[in-house]
Amino acid sequence: MRKVTGGVFLSLDGVMQAPGGPTEDYTGGFDQGGWLFRFGDEGIFDTVGSLFAGEYDLLLGRRTYDIFASYWPYVEGPEAEMGQAFTRAGKHVLTRGDQPLDWENSHRLKGVDDVAALKRSDGPDLIIQGSSTIYPELLAARLIDRLVLMIFPVTLGKGKRLFGDGTPAQALRMTDHKVTDKGTVIATYEPAGAIPADGSFPEPSNSQREQERQARMRNGNW
């Protein structure tokens, strides 16, 4: 059984759009592309190095695949080794479209059932990069085994978010954490099942004012 890890560069307000550069993804009027490199430090690069150590395949949304396929096969200099590793790796693209996937070792996944079948197959573990749109449905299907969140000390105000529409209610368990010298929190989580149904809550007020407030909530005019 393969495991799926999501490695996410994230702002404090949950935005993960275009960490790598201004031209990476400016859809929706996003104008803060490249924000990662304004706050990155050795602690982050160590974590990324550990994430991509050893053998792995990539699990990507179609737009992140397009970004990667337009950059990594052609990169030169210090990043060329990473580009070569990404080219060698299997790239499994979750997309409902039929556009060509012509970067070598690329494979199309039509839906969540295909991801589940991929997890059951033999092969290296899978790493998600970018690909904000695929997280809600993969979390809902309980297909993600680990989240490595690199949470930078910045708010971006707008942009694509990790936990978008369709994200299920569920518990997570922190398995590791650290803070870099520049204040980025690196937190690793694993699924921990459903949110407990029971809990100890303080007795609600039965005052007239509280009853009126409850009535306004029920009526939608609070």
Image: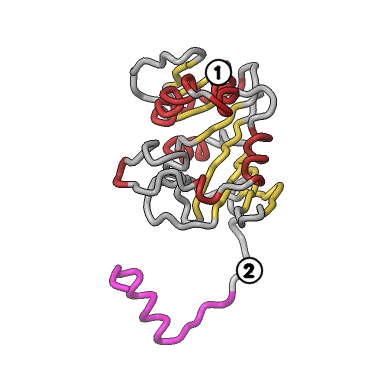
Closer to the camera in the image, 125 or 218: 125
Which residue sits at x=55%, y=18%?
90
- Location of residue 206 with respect to 2 vertically, above or below: below
Q: Which residue is mark 2?
A: 200
Tell me the kind of residue under disc 1: Gly
Which residues lie in the magenta part? 202-222
Tell me the kind of residue under disc 2: Ser
Rendering coords of residue 92 (x, y %): 50, 21
Residue, far front? 77
Mark number, residue 90: 1
Rendering coords of residue 18 (x, y %): 42, 41
- Location of residue 55 with respect to 29 vertically, above or below: above
Q: Residues within 10 Å of mark 1 (few under 14, many from 20)?
A: many
Q: Quadrant of residue 212?
A: bottom left
Closer to the camera in the image, 165 or 130: 130
Which residue sits at x=40%, y=26%?
66
Residue at disc 2, secondary structure: loop
Rendering coords of residue 62 (x, y %): 40, 27
Q: How many marks?
A: 2
Q: How is the image coloured?
A: secondary structure
Residue 203 lies in the magenta-colored region: yes
Which residue sits at x=60%, y=35%?
5
Is residue 96 visible from the viewing direction of this image?
A: yes
Closer to the camera in the image, 156 or 203: 156
